[in-house]
Image (cartoon, rainbow, N blue to C red):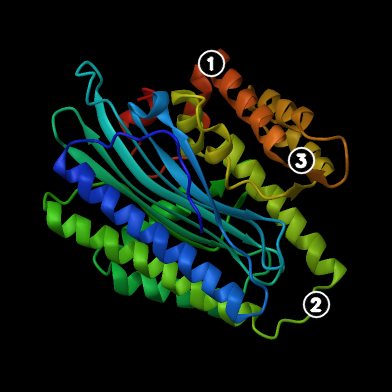
Amino acid sequence: MTQQTTQQRIPATSGKSTQALTLVSALQHRFTQGLESLSRDLGREQPFNAVEWFRDNGIHGGGVRYETADGPLFGRGSVNVSQVHYDDNPAKQLASATAISTIIHPSHPLAPSVHIHLSWTEMRNGKGYWRMMADLNPSHENPEDTGRYFDALRKAAPEQFDAAVAQGERYFFIPALERHRGVAHFYLEAYNSGNVQADLDLATTVGETAIDSYLDILRDALTDAEAPTPEQQQAQQAYHTLYFFQVLTLDRGTTSGLLVHNQNDVGILGSIPAYVDRNLLKSWVPNMQQPQDHLLNALISALPDTSPSLVDEAVKQQLANVVREHYISHPGALALQASGDVIPPTVNNHR
């Protein structure tokens, strides 16, 4: 892994934000090192390369993501760490937001995708909250893997586990399709127990456990894996299309990030799989309520007119513009997006 920069990202100054940045940076290193080590062990080496971005030329922070694509092991992978702050603008309600957000889409259809997100949001008055998400996303569910992932997270957060699973089940449900995205959902929103150190320790344990458990599941799935069948590949593409649909029509975190600024659009859409089925997306338009049917049609129009449709960086930029323009024109449609038990004020106030 290499990292080069000619600019400087200025970090947030608060102690809690500094602790959060230290944590998410350590988790980023843990995950990228683990993924690269796995690829070497399996004889299909695939590096993750650093891409840095700057919020307002670094004055308000920015981030660095390690990404990979179109390799022997991973079709798409992004491990993004960011910190945005407004230390120089006391009028802002939000003081800082520090996060790791990662999605891995393995090439083999029997190896599950994973999404992990941990973030610390701090308000101007010094109060803040954690957002902790971990969800396993296979195109072909292995019930043993689902159980392993749940068991690991239950041990990591025994007191919070039941509430996190219930909230995750709610957040990742897709009403238009009457199904969930993923099979193992853990989601704590706006979490603050009142004990700063205990919450930091919980975020650390949840992050490390989600990463390590997934690496174990991935290793088992890919070791001595047979070549996929056309049917398995087709099912994976359909699932990737579902993932695309959920992220771009329901995910509040993605939408909020795109509405706040346009300086990291490609990074924010790092979770989008490489290929999606345009015709399958079209078949879901009649299931959408207004004005989200217009959003889905616009997203489809932004895709290449091929089957399957490649989602490269240029297409991601177009998709980001579509989402941003849709919610600027239809701000009330934000209420139609996914939610857990709580919708943080920063999500709908565009920070």
Residue under circle 3? Answer: 281
- Label 1 vs label 3: CA separation? 23 Å
Q: In this view, does 63 lie above or below 206?
A: above
Nearer the observer: mark 1 or 3; the answer is 1
Q: Around disc 2, counting alpha carbons within 10 Å, would you say few (fewer than 14), some (14 to 19), or many (20 or more)?
A: few
Question: Can you name the residue that lies furthest to the front here?
Answer: 6
Q: Tell me where residue 38 sits by quadrant.
A: bottom right
Q: In this view, does 165 lie above or below 6?
A: below
Mark sitting earlier along the chain (1/2):
2
Task: Give the amino acid at mark 1.
Answer: Ile
For residue 154, the mark is: none
Mark sitting earlier along the chain (1/3):
3
Mark sitting earlier along the chain (3/2):
2
Where residue 30 appears, x then y in whole percent? 40, 65
Quarter occupied by the C terminus: top left
Where residue 316 appears, x then y in whole percent? 66, 35
- Residue at 80% of width from left, 37% of height from top? 282
Where residue 249 appears, x then y in whole percent? 60, 35
Residue under circle 2? Answer: 227
Task: Give the amino acid at mark 3.
Answer: Leu
Residue under circle 1? Answer: 328
- Residue at 47% of width from left, 77% of height from top? 148
